[in-house]
């Protein structure tokens, strides 16, 4: 079989996808129309024929990303968004996903937390029933906002604890170290949530941020985190603890000018549980298969290693023991 057929057929798990990052320009138009709201400026100015967004780094990406989501207003919007993504994932033979959402990006513009969570939950349940795809939900805090807002969001979400497996940290990393949220993550852990944090590639303080999430926060996983190759002690620490990395090849190549394929392979070969994921597939133009093929394009990777990446994903996933038995 060709490599693309091989990749397409491989059973996969996706552990790093932002549900708001699956909002395609065409879905943006659909929601704007049915909610009678204007098409966001960042979308209106696009070349609609190409259905593509344009940006060159993390802040310019985030500006378009936060602008576009103003069309998400009702529980039905969130349900439809999740359903559309999970149909796409299912079509690529993704059996399990762990999906981020950014509640503060919605509550800060007047959409209630119950609307967001109940809508997302409806989409997840529908996809589980109709497609058999399983999903866990991860609630992310926006690191460029105040920790008090994150703490209030955590407390407001406690009634939905059974629907949310973990909390995370995302948005603009510059001058927003993980330690800023130490109290929030401590409380989240006490409430029974697992913890993961974004350590985006090539940030101003990448190594220090990776150190903080491992030593000060005590995360169960790291999102991106590829810069860890630069610090042998930290690599030994994630190996010792079995902590996995959710890498995103296409996204990394947008955020940094330096593609991280070589580093991902180096970590894989040294026994770190690295995985390949899509991050914001509607924006970075690539779902799971495209990200795996992009890695294979850029680095010498064997089919056995591509299988190992998926074994890692199922292993470091937070899938229930019951489902793990069915899938593995
Ligand atoms: C994100 Cl690529 C990236 N980095 C940080 N926060 C994010 N939220 C959505 N995509
Ligand atoms: Zn991400």
Image (cartoon, rainbow, N blue to C red):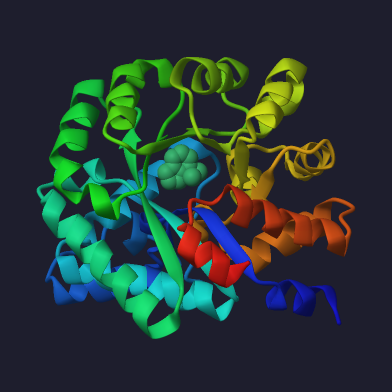
Q: How many badges with numbers are in the image?
A: 0
- State the residue in front, 230 or 254: 230
- Quarter of the figure with residue 157: top left
* Position in image of residue 97 (x %, y %): 48, 61
* Position in image of residue 221 (x %, y %): 53, 37
Is residue 108 at all visible to an observer of this figure?
no
- Quarter of the figure with residue 242: top right
- Quarter of the figure with residue 30: bottom left
| Relative horizontal placement of residue 148, taking residue 270 as reference (left or right) | left
Give above or below for 173 relative to 293: above
Is residue 187 at all visible to an observer of this figure?
yes
Residue at position x 44%, y 68% in the image: 134
Residue at position x 77%, y 19% in the image: 232
- State the residue in front, 224 or 163: 163
Image quadrant where one finds the C terminus: bottom right
Image quadrant where one finds the N terminus: bottom right
Residue at position x 18%, y 64% in the image: 38
* Position in image of residue 5 (x %, y %): 77, 80
* Position in image of residue 259 (x %, y %): 73, 42
| Relative horizontal placement of residue 215, taking residue 167 as reference (left or right) | right
């Amino acid at each position: 079989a060709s490599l693309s057929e091989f990749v397409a057929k491989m059973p996969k798990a996706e552990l790093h996808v932002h549900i708001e990052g699956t909002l395609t320009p065409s879905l943006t138009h659909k929601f704007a129309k049915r909610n009678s709201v204007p098409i966001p400026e960042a979308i209106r100015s696009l070349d609609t024929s190409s259905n593509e967004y344009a940006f060159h780094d993390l802040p310019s990406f985030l500006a378009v990303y936060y602008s576009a989501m103003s069309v998400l207003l009702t529980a039905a919007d969130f349900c439809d968004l999740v359903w559309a993504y999970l149909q796409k994932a299912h079509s690529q033979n993704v059996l399990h996903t762990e999906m981020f959402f950014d509640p503060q990006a919605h509550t800060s513009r007047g959409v209630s937390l119950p609307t967001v969570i109940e809508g997302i939950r409806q989409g997840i349940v529908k996809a589980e029933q109709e497609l058999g795809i399983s999903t866990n939900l991860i609630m992310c805090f926006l690191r460029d906002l105040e920790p008090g807002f994150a703490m209030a969001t955590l407390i407001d979400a406690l009634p939905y604890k059974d629907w949310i497996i973990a909390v995370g940290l995302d948005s603009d990393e510059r001058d927003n170290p993980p330690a800023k949220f130490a109290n929030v993550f401590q409380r989240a852990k006490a409430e029974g949530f697992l913890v993961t944090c974004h350590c985006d590639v090539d940030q101003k303080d990448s190594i220090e941020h990776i150190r903080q999430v491992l030593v000060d926060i005590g995360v169960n996983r790291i999102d991106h985190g590829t810069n860890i190759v630069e610090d042998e002690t930290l690599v030994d620490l994630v190996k010792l603890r079995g902590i996995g990395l959710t890498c995103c090849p296409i996204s990394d190549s947008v955020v940094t000018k330096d593609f991280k394929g070589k580093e991902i392979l180096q970590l894989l070969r040294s026994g770190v549980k690295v995985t390949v994921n899509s991050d914001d597939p509607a924006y970075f133009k690539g779902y799971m298969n495209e990200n795996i093929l992009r890695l294979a394009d850029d680095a010498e990777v064997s089919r056995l290693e591509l299988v190992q990446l998926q074994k890692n994903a199922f292993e470091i996933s937070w899938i229930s023991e019951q489902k793990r038995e069915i899938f593995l």
